[in-house]
Amino acid sequence: MSEKNRDGKRSARERLAQEREKQRAKDRRRRGLIVGGAVVGVLALAAVIGVIAANSGGEKNTASGPVTAPQGAVGKDSLAIPVGKDGAKSTLTVWEDFRCPACKAFEDGYRTTIHQLTASGKLKVEYHLATLIDKNLRGSGSLRAANAAACAQDAGKFTPYHDVLYENQPPETNDAYADNTKLIALAGKVSGLVTPGFRTCVNDGSHDSWVKKSNDAFQAGGFQGTPTVLLNGKNVYANQSNPLTPAKLKQMVEAAGTQ
């Protein structure tokens, strides 16, 4: 074989080897892209799962803990704290928030009348506790005060402590009731309320989940705000064209008692 032919065959072999090497390089790059894409996909999926898990965990945390109703609570899911005699002909349903200034105005204006009607056996009141101000203005004073009031119910002291909380209500933007120490100090105004059991109940948030469930019920009820006041199921406090007064409330309750 001539030298020229040998050189030609060698060149052909070299070109073929080069082409094969190029093809192998392309294959390696393609495999790398496929693997890299798979890794990115796995990481992205893991991130999504992580977000879902985190969100799910957050939802669980907000409703964590057993729902422990205060002693004597009544109604659906035991979400109402009753005041008055069971045999009363009329029932006043009151949805309130201890940080709500309008609730304080209602209590200040109607407290004496309501006490007189419940004491006479003509009216029973069912209090439902909400935490709207905590959500609207941020904070936890509505929740903490409601839990403390539920603890007072356990001790048979709900009504006087309920009144003390409204009589000493801080400004709406001042989340003073977020401090359990403040709530326990105010409980000192109610004879016999401050006991080790009451302190533990307040500090441990024993009824927090119950308060949250009560607030959920308020939201589900479609009510417009606090206070919401219903007499025998009829909203008697929202009619601005014919506003309720303590005298009208007394008249309606007494009229119902004669039926």
Image (spheres, rainbow, N blue to C red):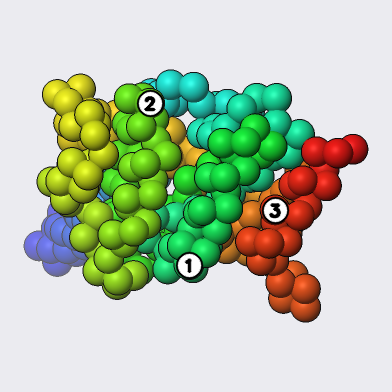
Quarter of the C terminus within the rendering: top right
Where residue 164 sits: x, y (%)?
32, 50
**Label 2 to label 1, Cα distance in Å?**
25 Å
Is the Cβ of the residue at disc 3 closer than 8 Å to that at disc 1? no
What's the residue type where badge 3 is placed? Answer: Lys
Q: Find residue 208 and report its image quarter.
A: top left
First reached walking from the N terminus: tag 2 or tag 3 = 2
Instruction: Name which residue type carries label 1.
Output: Ala
For the residues marked 2 and 3, what is the alpha-carbon distance in whole angstroms? 26 Å
The front one of 77 and 73 is 73
The mark lying in front, picked from 3 and 1, is 3
Asked whether residue 69 appears in the rendered view, the answer is yes
* Badge number at residue 140: none
Q: Which residue is drawn at 70% across and 56% down?
A: 249
Residue behind mark 2: 156
Task: Kindly identify the residue that appears in the image at 70 percent across and 25 percent down.
Answer: 87
Q: Position of residue 248 (x, y in %)?
A: 73, 61
Q: Mark 1 points at which residue?
A: 105
Q: In this view, does 84 lie to the left or right of 6?
A: right
Near mark 3 (Cα within 10 A), the count class, few <14, some 14-19 or many ≥20, is some
Residue 227, position as x, y percentages in the image: 55, 59
Please name whichever residue, 117 or 174, is drawn nearer the observer in this view of the structure.
117
- At label 2, counting other C-alpha atoms closer than 10 Å, the crowd grade (few under 14, some 14-19, many 20 or more) is some
Of the numbered discs 2 and 1, the one sitting upstream in the chain is: 1
Quickly name the residue at label 3: 250
Mark 1, other Cα within 10 Å: few <14 / some 14–19 / many ≥20: some
Left or right? Give the position of 207 relative to 228: left
Which residue is drawn at the image coordinates 27% and 65% (left, top)?
170
Give percent across and percent down for residue 196: 14, 24
The amino acid type found where label 2 is placed reads Gly
Between 118 and 53, which is closer to the camera in this rendering? 118
| SS of the residue under disc 3 | helix
